Amino acid sequence: MNNTPQTVTDNFDRSAYKVLEILEQGAKKIYILGTAHVSKRSVEEVEQLIHSLKPDTVCVELCETRYQSMVDDTRWKKLNIFDVIKQGKTLLLMANLALASFQRKLGDQFGIKPGAELKAAVEAATETGAKLVLADRDVQITLKRSWANVPWWKRIVVMSGLIDSVWSDTELSEEDLESLKDKDQLSAMMTEFAEKLPEIKGPLIDERDQYLMSNIQEAEGNVVVAIVGAGHVQGMLSHFGTPVDRSLIEQIPPKKKWVGLLKWIIPALIFSAFYFGWRDHQGESFSNMLTAWVLPNSIMAGLLTIVAGGRFLSVVTAFVASPITSLNPTLGAGMVVGLVEAWLRKPTVEDLENLHDDIRTIKGFYRNPFTRVLLVTLFSTLGSALGAIVGLSWVMNIWAQGS
């Protein structure tokens, strides 16, 4: 079996396609069309290629989750803010929103819905009787593996970059967008991306290149068309013919042991300090330690809840809950405060429908009740964490002085 990328002569004008690779795998021909997700020309190329070839199988850069979001416009209406907070998915959802908003902003600029070429591929597959294969890895797995790969001290940088991409005023021309599909430019961009965020490039791009190519190679039929973002094409070609165990890159990395232990170590140290302060100094040190623990926890959590625009009751909840939840490894202040804020604001279906438009500006982000709840949850969590660090240092200092 020949598993080497080859130039194949076909009965259609190959020059009509900006990024098109044609591979041979025994009797099978695989056509990989690279697209831009907010490009009218890409939609035209997809429709033209599938209808001219009438392939046995059409593979698309979609997973089941993204596919359902594409075909079901009412999916957002089913999102439950209380479930998001309880399951600890606040940060993950905000990253999803930022990425979706960036694509939608570009789509509005060019008068096309993000992912329109993938939807065109799905429709063309149905029209030509081709089998449809959702070839990408589940987006939630990709985001979780990417996030787990980023050191905690770099996560703020990543989130800042996502937010900046949403609120940036930079605009691209149609020519700029099409030029991004040029192989040399894409190679340079991927190299730059790898240098800036090597931890994310692996799960976000390299693993998906392997995953996509593996699924496409296994697709049924002698004529297979694959529609993928142009940025994936060169990486996919490098994995052509290479066996891939997809189950290995579908696993969610377990949380680092030290992170889990830290949740128990901090309360253990605090309780130990309280005990010895009470026992050895007739309660004087205990009182000082209690103040040292409560004040930074309460003030930091309450202050950042105010910054996030939380309601008065949410601020009070953060002030009261943070010193307590910081000593409870199973419960975070952000969860408690977020649930209170959600109960007070009661986001509606209309708020969800306005979500993608509202998050394009800082004002809109704060105005939408749904994103306001997410902000309050995130900021109160951050405030509580900072307060716990300061409080722990203060308590241990008092303990050391009294020993």
Image: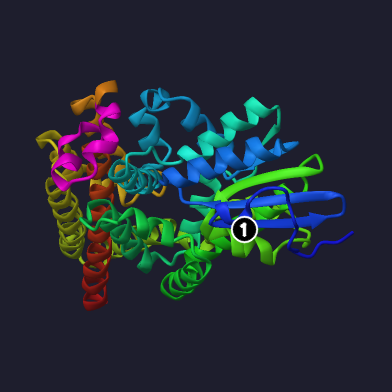
Q: Is residue 330 magenta?
A: no
Give the answer, above or below, for where 295 lies relative to 302: below
**Left or right of 352, for residue 185:** right
Query: What residue is rendered at 43% in x and 38% in y?
Result: 87
Residue that appears at 56% across and 42% down:
46
Give the magenta-colored segment's residue range.
351-370
Identify residue for label 1: 209
**As rendered, which of 112 and 341 lies closer to the eye?**
112
Which of the pair 321/5 is nearer the observer? 5
Residue 311 percent location from the top left of the image = 12, 35
Q: Position of residue 317 (x, y in %)?
A: 18, 39
| Three-letter code, disc 1 | Asp
Quarter placement of the N terminus: bottom right
Drawn side of residue 38 relative to residue 295, left or right: right
**Residue 118, above or below 32:** above
Q: Secondary structure at mark 1?
A: helix
Q: Residue at x 68, y 50 (%)?
A: 31
